[in-house]
């Protein structure tokens, strides 16, 4: 499992492909995952949509809006350790976040999913109900390394970048 360090300069390098993903292929990818039985947390208004494709598109559209306006943040290992030492009781999420919309990358993963994939970033912004929605972003390369996902072996040109197709 890779817990490689992500230095501060990686924040923009991770935010941009994440934004590209939600702009270009998140709706299709998430609809495929939903059809395979992967459960997504979603607001009741989105969950009530009759088609999987509509639910996935609504989630992708909302995430695109949040990421487009996100302020970028980076947490060093020392900052994470200091934050861990603070007791947070009964505080509203909005009181803890540094901006209305943001994208945060941790130098070291703050947690791992049950399958070993590290969480490397979080984004937040306005939710459907006017509250705050938080999304957690994992390290896809680790999923590939663990055999949970695979590259399909080709790259698609996307402007100045190359995007590999990943199947999970």
Image (tube, rainbow, N blue to C red):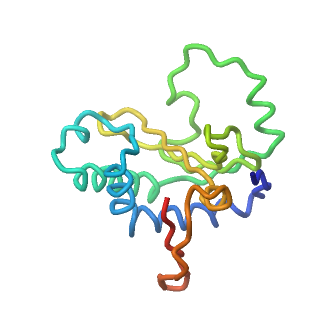
Q: Who's the residue at 62% across and 43% down the image?
A: 115
Q: Nearer the viewer, residue 123 or 2?
A: 2
User: Picture quarter containing residue 44?
Assistant: top left
Q: Is residue 168 left or right of residue 77?
A: left
* Image x and y of residue 84, in percent: 75, 27
Q: Who's the residue at 57% across and 61% down the image?
A: 15
Q: Nearer the viewer, residue 78 or 3?
A: 3
**In the rendered view, would you say 97 is above or below 150?**
above
Q: Nearer the viewer, residue 118 or 81?
A: 118
Q: Extreme top residue here?
A: 90
Q: Extreme front residue here?
A: 147
* Image x and y of residue 7, in percent: 78, 58
Q: Is residue 68 left or right of residue 138?
A: left
User: Picture quarter containing residue 96?
Assistant: top right
Q: Who's the residue at 48% across and 46% down the image?
A: 101
* Image x and y of residue 31, in percent: 32, 55
């Amino acid at each position: 499992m890779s817990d490689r360090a992500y230095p501060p300069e990686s924040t923009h390098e991770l935010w941009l492909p994440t934004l590209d993903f939600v702009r270009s292929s998140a709706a299709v990818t998430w609809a495929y995952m939903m059809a395979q039985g992967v459960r997504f947390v979603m607001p009741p208004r989105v969950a009530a949509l009759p088609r999987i494709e509509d639910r996935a598109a609504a989630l992708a559209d909302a995430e695109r809006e949040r990421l487009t306006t996100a302020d970028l943040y980076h947490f060093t290992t020392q900052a994470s350790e200091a934050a861990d030492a603070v007791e947070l009781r009964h505080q509203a999420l909005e009181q803890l976040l540094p901006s209305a919309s943001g994208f945060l990358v941790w130098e070291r993963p703050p947690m791992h999913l049950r399958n070993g994939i590290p969480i490397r970033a979080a984004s937040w912004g306005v939710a459907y109900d006017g509250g705050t929605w938080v999304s957690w972003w994992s390290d896809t390369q680790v999923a590939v390394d663990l055999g949970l996902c695979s590259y399909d072996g080709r790259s698609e040109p996307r402007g100045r970048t190359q995007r590999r197709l990943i199947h999970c």
